[in-house]
Image (cartoon, rainbow, N blue to C red):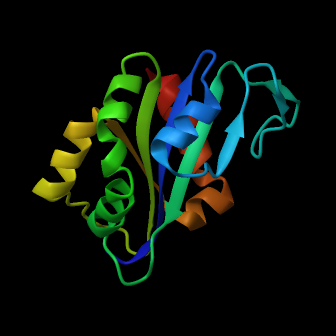
Amino acid sequence: MEGHGFVKLRITGENLDFEEIIQALSCQPSFTYRKGEHYTPKFGDKQPKVYKEDCLLFETEKQDDETIDDMLYKFLTGFTKSKEYINELSQKADITLWVSVYPDEEQSNIHLGNKTVKLLSDMGLSVDFNIMFLKDLYNGIYKREREENLNVR
């Protein structure tokens, strides 16, 4: 698949022990926040908001020469030494693999190979895919269509 994308391992919950998690995963997070900290949303209402939980976010960006499956597998293998810890942590925290895909074409396919699916299963991870065209995001069309779809229900 041509296009851009990111994969993020998002760990959220109450009273997360950041030091323990970072040490167990042997990886520095790209972003962290604590419950009660303030932030200003990038889109929509620019009024300051308060985070409702603790969060650690580990991420990587898709390279031009790799597929989404390649990106996911490479990212996940960085955590294989910690898969038992991640599985245990998933019992008390919300751990999600968040995949954002920005295809160049209007049609694309995301294929996850058996080895990637096995790693996801071994780690006890759920997966969220966000697929949107960057031009729609930048033009505000994605948000508008999403809001219209939510209002229809």
Q: Is residue 146 visible?
A: no
**18 lies left or right of 76:** right
> Relative to residue 126, is residue 91 depicted above or below?
above
Residue 121 rendering spot, x and y as whole percentages:
20, 38
**8 lies left or right of 57:** left
Residue 145 rendering spot, x and y as whole percentages:
53, 43
**145 lies left or right of 83:** right
At horizontal 47% and vertical 64% (from top left) the residue drawn is 5
**105 lies left or right of 133:** left
Give the position of the N terminus as an image quadrant. Answer: bottom left
Q: Is residue 12 visible?
A: yes
Residue 93 rendering spot, x and y as whole percentages:
47, 21
At horizontal 81% and vertical 34% (from top left) the residue drawn is 45
At horizontal 63% and vertical 34% (from top left) the residue drawn is 19
Give the position of the C terminus as an image quadrant. Answer: top left
At horizontal 33% and vertical 48% (from top left) the residue drawn is 81
Residue 20 sits in which quadrant?
top right
Q: Which residue in the rendered view is the most extreme toward the left?
A: 114
Query: 142 or 63: nearer the eye?
Result: 63
Residue 66 rendering spot, x and y as whole percentages:
34, 77
